[in-house]
Image (tube, grey):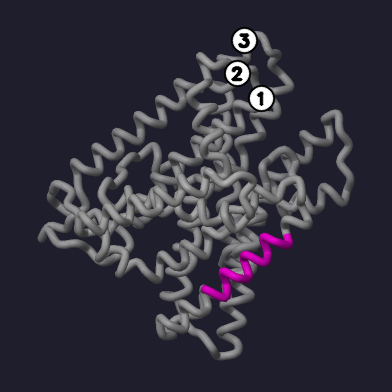
Amino acid sequence: MNLFLALIVALTLHGIWNGRRTGVATPTGTATPSNHATPTNQTTTANPAATATHFLSRSQTNAVNGVFIMIVFASHVTAHYPTTPWSDGGMLWLISQLGQLMVACFLLFSGYGMMVSLASKSGYARTIPRARIGATLAQFIPITACYLVLAMIGPEPVSATYAFFAMFGWFSLANASWYIFAILALWALTWVVFRGAERVGVWSPGASPARTWVLVAAFTLVVALFELWMSTQKPNQHYTFYSMLCFPAGMMLALARPAYTRLVVTTPGWLAALTVPLAATYGLSLVDRPHFFVFGMESIAFALTIVSVLARFPLRSRPLEWCGENLFWLYTVQNLPMIVLDRMLGDAGARFTYPVLALVATAALAIVAKRLLAPLGRAVRG
């Protein structure tokens, strides 16, 4: 997997070089205020104002998510074959250093996108159960059913109750379903808080910034309480949910984006926006047996460090963007080929054949699953 790590690094460095080379300025050289890069008929050198404006564009967040879904894949695949320091040591070190931080950006960007939709689309909160939760489950349940089939023909029996709750991500069928359950729960809590606020007339998409900030603060408290509850329900797996606070942090970033952009367009401001969360990430990582709130703050600080890097170093990589665009499919199917290969291949030679076969099979399965199930999700979404 050291070669896979080298591939990730090469794609990232090439993406940064390509981003700095192409730039994101408009033909007039001014920054574009929209959330997505505006096509232009000329290429300019990247400048702070332009890159800062687009540091949270869809292409940028997809590219970053692409980097981390590749690391997530590596963290799963290395658990299925005999690793050695010389062939896997670099990747294993990175995985051990990141831990649950590798999903921090997923949640931060998801919260950011949710807040943008809530603030800009009238009645969006009302659609969350169908457009977000229902559509995702319509795609997740058939994939989970494949894991169930593999589990049923495996050595351990699976009860009907376990299988039922696994369909919603509460239990795992060796498919790392905790993240899917976490994001579904966050969407459900978003619907409860924001739709509830709409129903009682205390908030709407056109509400004042102060009122929206108060509601997001209340939502953050709800998420923190949910994390506490999860620690009682899953005491052996509670650490996996500690990064959920990144989701409301992403909402806050969406609200603070104009001020944040003004900060990072200046060199002193950008250095402050980079060094403060970076120092916080390192300092909080030194805490022994951290409380969930401490790890939540570390996750937020880490994700904000990545955002600050993007503000000056845009990432333009089509392979990484593809991985980010297909994050759901890559995440949900990747353990299927790993389970099958684990049963088919012995230790002999698996060190080299297993990760290559798993990577190719995961990409192929993600493409097939998207082709078959994305229309179902769109039908549910309406």
Q: Nearer the viewer, mark 3 or mark 2?
A: 2
Q: Closest to the observer: 1 or 100? A: 100
Placement of 14 over or under 38, stated as above or below: above
Q: Is residue 154 above or below residue 344?
A: below
Magenta-tinted stretch: 217-229
Whether residue 114 sits left or right of residue 153 in the image: it is: left
> In terms of depth relative to the viewer, which is nearer, 102 or 77?
102
Residue 182: give x, y in percent of width and height: 64, 56
Examine the rendered structure and indicate whether residue 114 appears above or below residue 146: below
Which labelled disc corresponds to residue 325?
none
- Return the mark for residue 349: 3
Q: Which residue is mark 2?
A: 83
Kind of residue at badge 3: Gly
Q: Which residue sits at x=61%, y=50%?
A: 290
Task: Determine if residue 129 is in view.
Answer: no
Q: Closer to the camera, 186 or 231?
A: 231
Which of pointers 3 and 2 lies earlier in the amino acid sequence? 2
Residue 266 percent coordinates (x, y): 20, 58
Circle 1 Cα neighbour tier, 10 Å, few/some/many (<14 / 14–19 / ≥20): some
Q: Position of residue 303 (x, y in %)?
A: 44, 51
The type of residue carrying mark 2 is Thr
Pointer 1 or 3: first along the chain: 1
Looking at the image, how many numbered discs can be counted on the residues?
3
Residue at 48% across, 24% down: 90
Q: Residue furthest left?
A: 28
Residue corresponding to mark 1 = 80
